[in-house]
């Protein structure tokens, strides 16, 4: 969480291991020993961010909602997660070039898995008539857009405002995918 918060605020290249170690109350040597180098930490942050997304998808699916309602609920939940200082997931804007080749392959695999899950969820909503028929490839390219900016540390808001923002993102999603 500390590393994700720093990477989101400053970028990977300008965040030092000393800063991460200081945030968690240790030193760089202990960080190396128990966590690894910066590439390992960035890879763990990406993995953690994907776990949040997959969790919100699974939770929304468990609610017994229509496919479209599940998509809207997921966007709302992700909007809350991305604003949470307690969770601080890594931003999707962090470039993969900070990763080793092996870690990059792992993150790309997670990204492909998320794309496949998202494609199926959108297709299910289209088949049910709950979502207008649009090009899913195009939709998958733009779907992260409305919430991606929420992890930036310059956005300060209280809990009430965070809920309002998440509700607005959910409404944006609902209107954007609504059947015509």
Image: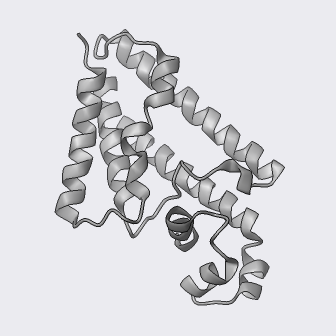
Q: Across the whole image, how many numbered discs are drawn on residues?
A: 0
Residue sitting nearer the eye, 120 or 64: 120
Where, by quadrant of the figure, is residue 13 drawn? bottom right
Task: Please tell me in which quadrant of the rendered image residue 30 appears.
Answer: bottom right
Q: Could you tell whether 70 is left or right of 109 in the image? A: left
Q: x, y (%) of residue 66? A: 29, 25
Q: Relative to 85, does residue 60 appear above or below in the rendering?
A: above
Along the line of sight, the residue nearer the viewer: 25 or 67: 25
Picture residue at 53% right of the left edge, 73% below the top: 2
**What is the image's colouring?**
one colour
Could you tell whether 66 is left or right of 108 in the image?
left
> Is 142 drawn above or below residue 33 in the view shown?
above
- Percent from the top left, x then y, of residue 124? 41, 17
Residue at 49% x, 59% y is 89
Q: Quadrant of the C terminus?
A: top left
Residue extending furthest toward the right = 101
Residue at left 51%, top 54%? 91
Q: Position of residue 65 (x, y in %)?
A: 28, 30
Q: What residue appears at the point 25 percent right and 65 percent down from the top-left corner?
A: 157
């Amino acid at each position: 969480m500390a590393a994700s918060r720093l990477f989101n605020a400053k970028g990977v290249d300008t965040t030092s291991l000393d800063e991460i170690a200081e945030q968690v109350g240790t030193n760089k040597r202990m960080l190396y020993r128990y966590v690894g180098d910066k590439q390992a930490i960035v890879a763990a942050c990406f993995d953690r961010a994907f776990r949040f997304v997959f969790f919100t998808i699974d939770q929304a699916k468990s609610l017994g909602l229509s496919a479209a309602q599940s998509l809207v609920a997921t966007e709302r939940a992700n909007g809350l997660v991305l604003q949470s200082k307690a969770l601080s997931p890594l931003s999707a804007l962090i470039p993969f070039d900070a990763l080793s080749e092996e870690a990059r392959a792992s993150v790309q695999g997670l990204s492909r898995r998320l794309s496949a899950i998202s494609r199926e969820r959108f297709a299910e909503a289209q088949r049910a008539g709950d979502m207008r028929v649009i090009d899913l490839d195009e939709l998958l390219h733009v779907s992260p857009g409305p919430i991606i900016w929420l992890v930036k540390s310059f956005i300060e808001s209280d809990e009430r405002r965070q809920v309002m923002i998440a509700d607005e993102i959910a409404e944006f999603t609902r209107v954007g995918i609504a059947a015509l």
